[in-house]
Structure formats: C-alpha cells, structure tokens
Amino acid sequence: MARHDNDYLSGAGSNTPFNFDAGQLLLQAHREQQKKERRQRRIVGFVGMVLVIALITVIGLVSYKSIHQRNVAQSVTVQQSYQDLQAVKLKPKYADAKGGILFSHLGYGKTEPNAPTLEIFTDPMCPGCAVLHQQMDETFRSMLDAGQVNLSIHPVTFLDGSSSDQYSTRASGAVAYIASNDPDPDHLLDFLTNIHSESFQPSENQDYRPVSDDQLKQQALSAGVPQNIADKAFDGEYKPWLQASAQYTLRRDELKNKSGEFAGKITTPLVLINGSMMDISAISDRGLTYKQAILQTIGLTNDGVGVEGVMPTLGAKDKPSYPKQTA
C-alpha cells in the first residue's frame, strides 16, 4: 500500500487534473510545520519566562518575609520577650510568669514549703525528653505523693517544624488545657507519660507520621482526664501563650548548655533544680542516668523515694551541687 502511494505522488504532474508537484507540497507543508513549531516554542518560552519571573518573585517575597521575621525575632531582647509573654491575654490557669505550670501533692499552684522545686522543659517530639519521662515519671509520682518535691512543667514547642501538623503545639496545648481544667495533677503527669512512651511518641522530620487530635485525646482519656475536658483540650486556645513562652525561653541565657556539643545553645530536655540548671551533657559524660543525677542532687536515696516523712537533704531554697562523678 505504501508503494502505491509513493508511485502516485512521484507520477503526479501535468497529466493530473490538479497539476501540482507533490514534492513541493510536502516541502511547503514541512516549512509550515516548522514555522508553527517555532511559534509554539516562542509562546511556551514566553510563558515559561513569565512563570519563572513569577516564581522568583514569590520566592523572593517568601524569603524576604522569612528573613525579616527572623531578623525581627532575633532583635527582640529577653526583657521584651518576657513582656510579650506577660501581655498574652489567655494563659493557663496556673502558669507562672516564666511559662511553668507548678504543682505538688497539695495541688496546682501550691508548693510543699520544705521541698526543692524541679522545673522540666519538655517538647512532646523531643526524643531526649522521652528518655527523661520514661526514666523519671514514676519517680516523680512517688516523690510528689510523699511531698518530697514540687514540680513545674514548661511545655515547649521548639520541634513544631519536625512534624507536618504542628504536633508539638497541639500536644503542648493539651498539657496547658488539662492543667487549667482538670484539678488532679496525676492526670497531667500520666498524659505526659503516655505521649512520651516508646509506643506513642512519633518520629521526627522525614519519618514523621501524622498524629490526629483523636489519637492524642485517647492518650488523655487513658490518663484519667474526663471526657468533657479531653474533648476541648485540642482547640488551640493556648497557642499564643505557647509561642510567647517559647520565644522567651529561647532568650534566657541561664538555660544555655554549659558544655558538650551544644554548648551555648538551648536544647531540650532542660532540668532546673531550685532555679539552677542541670548540665545534662556533663551528667551523661559521667555515666549517670537522669534518675541517678536528680536523686543525688536533691539528696535522696532510691530507697527513700516515696517514703512519707523522708525529705531530700536539699531544701526549698538551697542551691544544688550537681554530682561530679559516677555513682
């Protein structure tokens, strides 16, 4: 069939009723096609150039806003960030001026007057925080029940960018809400234990898998939080307070690591005892667990944990002396 067509085209000439040169027609068609393709390339090129310019403009605007916001944030002093934290309208009911939520065996906002105070800065996505909670939460419960310590929880949101759905803010917001509305501090501590457990805490960055509010709510319910409180714990009403608290925390020089790889930087977990920060890097280098370091620092033996009437040797106002060698 192809051969017949070729024969027809090659034999067309003056004897054909249309008197056309098929070769010339093909050449003309080829040239028209080239012109059309060049025109299309010019259009595509122009559109592409417009898109590139638009993209560059958008990237430039985003970059400018990001850089501007970062520069503005960096220019804020610790005093200004402290004032911003105080200016937040809606704060957790028992939050102190520095972003901590204090409780003891006497309840929220109350202290055992003779006991040292432990402040824990914890991010729900922080693997190191998970280790701290896994090692210490049961001990915290026992010491709290016996009136041996006061505990202040600082929920922080440094690792929001390590999730795709602001996991740190949502979980920390629930901590703030539960502490404000559920009068039993045991429920809060149990919730913290649940979300920092190996079976629940999500991985960071590329390994992160979204965690729904319903999944977090289940952890609250299993901790004993009443249904009506758990239902509202993830509405995000304390987000401005969490953001302001994080900005203030990041500017507190006394919270910067004293040694190790992150010396001069603020990382989590953070542990303060009577306002003095534990050098976690140094503690780790000495081969101590969190539990060993904390008990040695407050002056309480493992056998004395949870025993009513047995108090740490470190009083409420004493400055701690952290252990200098392994136990």
Image: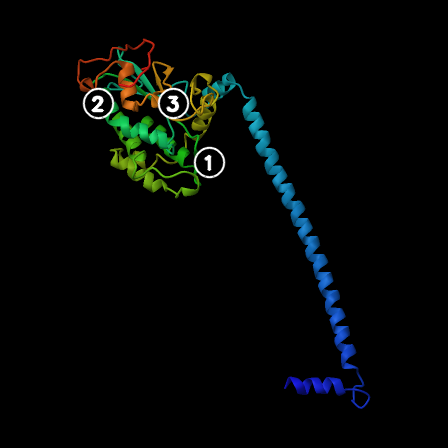
Is 174 situated above or below 294?
below
Counting other residues with Cα less than 10 Å from the Cα at mark 2, is it few (<14), some (14-19), or many (20 or more)? some
Residue type at the position of mark 3: Ser
The residues tagged by marks 1 and 2 sit, at their Cα atoms, a distance apart of 35 Å
Q: Considering only order in the chain, which callout, 2 or 1, is on the residue closer to the N terminus?
A: 2
The residues tagged by marks 3 and 1 sit, at their Cα atoms, a distance apart of 24 Å
Q: Position of residue 278 (x, y in %)?
A: 36, 18
What residue sits right under mark 3 in the picture? 281
Residue type at the position of mark 1: Gly
Residue type at the position of mark 2: Ser
Specify the label residue 169 is tagged with.
none
Is 73 situated above or below 37?
above
The residues tagged by marks 2 and 3 sit, at their Cα atoms, a distance apart of 26 Å
What residue sits right under mark 2 in the picture? 142
Specify the label residue 161 is tagged with.
1
Please name the residue shown 29% across and 32% down the image.
Answer: 191
Helix, strand or loop under label 1: helix
Q: Position of residue 105 (x, y in %)?
A: 24, 19
Helix, strand or loop under label 2: helix
In front: label 2 or label 3: 3
Which image quadrant for residue 55?
top right
